[in-house]
Amino acid sequence: MRESREFPREGPPGGILPATGYRARRAASAASRLRRAEAPAAMDPFLVLLHSVSAGLSGSDLAQLKFLCRNCVSKRKLELAQSGLDLFAVLLEQNELSAERTALLRELLCSLKRADLLRRLDDFERGAAGGAAPEERDLQAAMEIICDNVGKDWKRLARHLRVSDIKIEAIEEKYPRNLAEQVRELLRVWKNSVRQDAAVSRLVGALRGCQLNVVADLIEEDQRAQARQSGSTDPGPLTAWDLGSAAPGAS
């Protein structure tokens, strides 16, 4: 029998470091604002999202969320949580959740099978990517194209991105029977593994390496369209990645 697993955390190898200094104050401030239930217009976009998700939860949804969080939130705090906002405030305080760390929220909503709330999270993440640096926006756009088009071939892509079989199996266990989230989680795992080395050219190279040329073409076409729109130089074919070199840290 498989042992139950805690929700995986994004962060540095060896686990999350305790929030100290600025990070701790920022997390506490966000939790405090969420608890005060300020008008959404006065909040930052992530807190608006949490308000929206909380408002969409039923009583049974909340009970299931509390059950799912039993390994990362104390029993006493779970008992005191009377709404989604209460639970999200605790997760914010514990640095389990933030605008940059949405994986736990996504996993919780997937467990609830609430596609409507997942779409709100998708909209938030796309908006956050829109305010990022150009290279990050390009990467997010390429990842969205992959999510929309790779489908059941995601394991082939995973191996060309040097993601290990153990991590592939973990992705399948984390999102059983949810192909779209399996692809999204693959890209999240890959991006967290290679960190600053994550680039559109790596994705295009991996796609071409596993003969998913149509998806690679879609990404290159989108990149050229974005370049024309911004008035910058056409990036040309994005295949400068040496397929023989392993992606650092992805195995």
Image (tube, helix red, strand yellow):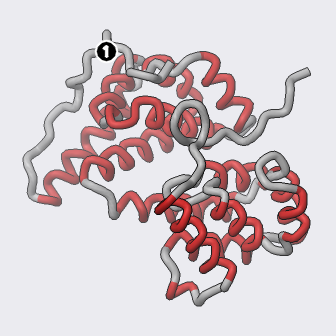
250 lies above or below 137: above
x%, y% of residue 56? Answer: 74, 73
Q: How many marks?
A: 1
Residue 132 occupies which quadrant of the picture? Answer: bottom left
Looking at numbered disc 1 in the image, what kind of residue is underneath it? Leu
The kind of secondary structure element at disc 1 is loop
Q: Which residue is mark 1?
A: 243
Question: Is residue 226 toward the left or the right of residue 20 in the image?
Answer: left
Assess disc 1: are there few (<14), some (14-19) or many (≥20) residues with their C-alpha within 10 Å of its C-alpha: some
User: Which residue shows up at 47% across the image and 62% down it?
Assistant: 22
Question: Is residue 55 toward the left or the right of residue 239 in the image?
Answer: right
Nearest the camera: 6 or 18? Answer: 18
246 lies above or below 190: above
x%, y% of residue 41? Answer: 51, 87
Question: Is residue 51 toward the left or the right of residue 232 in the image?
Answer: right
Nearest the camera: 111 or 74? Answer: 74
x%, y% of residue 229? Answer: 17, 59
Residue 85 occupies which quadrant of the picture? Answer: bottom right
Nearest the camera: 154 or 109? Answer: 109
Q: Residue furthest front?
A: 21
Q: Name the quarter where the N terminus is drawn.
A: top right
User: Which residue shows up at 76% across the image and 39% down it?
Assistant: 6
x%, y% of residue 28? Answer: 60, 69
Question: Is residue 109 toward the left or the right of residue 190 in the image?
Answer: right
User: Which residue shows up at 60% across the image and 80% down it?
Assistant: 33
Residue 87 occupies which quadrant of the picture? Answer: bottom right
141 lies above or below 4: below
User: Which residue shows up at 73% across the image and 77% down it?
Assistant: 55
